[in-house]
Amino acid sequence: MPSVIDPLEALRAACVQKGVIELLESEDGTPTEDINIAQYVRLNDKTLSLNSTTRFKHAGDENGVNLRQVIFCWLCKDLNVAEYISKCEENDIEDFPFLERADLIAYLEGSVNESQFIEPTGGETRRAKGRDEFSPALKRIYAAEKPLINHNTVLHGTKTIDFGYVRKEAQQMFLQKNSQQTNRQTVASPASSHGSGSRNRDPIILLSPSASAILNMSNIKDFLSNGRFEPPSASSDSNFLFINRTSPRLGRTVRFAFVDSTERFKPDYWDRVVAVFTTGQAWQFKSYKWSNPNDLFQKVKGFYVSYANDNAPAATKSWNIEKVSIDRTHRFRDREISEHIWDSIEKWMLAHGWARR
């Protein structure tokens, strides 16, 4: 008799091995990126129904969740809580609570080998079941038993809380403190040493704050200054930085201000924005002067940067942006790509009168 395929273990093997995880419209059908259209998933050499029941169970629920919900959680693993919940609502898929989601992702990527939410396999039996069969002494021991906690779980509550306001408050305090020390190190006044007039201030480049951005505040300086790409980290010490660029096209050294938030922008700052890097998510532009992408990319130079062979979001096809690909593993083209980005920005600046500033 052939062994029954465990959907959760098949997915975990594909995740750990960085193997094939491909959504299919039918068991032998064409691939799709739409989780709502997909009915099957190819996991390495196995094809499983997305309606398959897994061993992962919500707290207090005796029924396992289906493979579709687990797959979608994994595909959204790089999104923050708010973005993940929003994606689930868009696709009418039940989201996992914070702690369950963290446990599931850790299990699938191989960081842990068990979870309190995953039913054991084979002949294993949960201690919570069958305790009536134990001796009175063992029952007393289990009655006093407390679940073990570690630094990853001790601070987790029972419901999802968005602590985004803490970041905003900390950011404001940081900027106020630095503005008292020097006007040259604040997003509120990234003025050039050439003068304080609006025609002489630093050009501004906006980065995407999305967790899926492969160029962010943690790695943009090394990439554009030294032509060396490093995978981005999840956080950075600041939401702004400066890069000095000796431009042969502009005929001088220009200091560019890079920021990933427009929260403290003044109206005249938009006259200095020369480029915007996007991940193809329209929510990035909600606070911009031009919130419509079609209007925005008529006013500034736009870039969509992704790993080679990754598919761009469908929405970007109608946007006036330049698509740039970075190889995941080979670094020999980093300098060439970096210079190409600078060249595109400087050409745009020349065409829009920055040579005279």
Image (cartoon, rainbow, N blue to C red):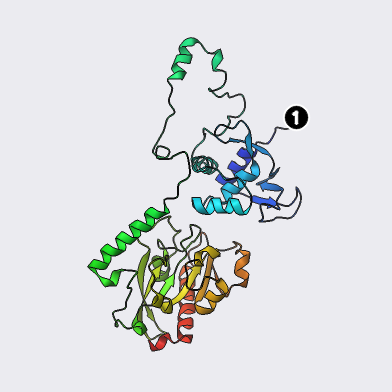
Quadrant where the N terminus sits is top right
Quadrant where the C terminus sits is bottom left
Give, as a three-letter code, the residue at label 1.
Answer: Met
Q: Is residue 151 left or right of residue 317?
A: left
Q: Residue furthest left?
A: 181
The quadrant holding residue 178 is bottom left
Depth check, front residue: 225 or 195 = 195
Mark yes or no: residue 17 visible. Answer: no
Q: Is residue 328 placed above or below 243 in the rendered structure? A: above
Q: Residue furthest top?
A: 136
SS label for mark 1:
loop
The residue at 39%/78% (across/down) is 268
The quadrant holding residue 293 is bottom right
Q: Is residue 167 placed above or below 12 in the rendered structure? A: below
Depth check, front residue: 294 or 280 = 294
Residue 323, how many percent across, how many down? 56, 70
The residue at 57%/63% (across/down) is 308
| Classed neighbour count for the residue bearing mark 1: other residues with Cα under 10 Å, few (<14), some (14–19), many (≥20) | few
According to the picture, the residue beneath numbered tag 1 turns out to be 1
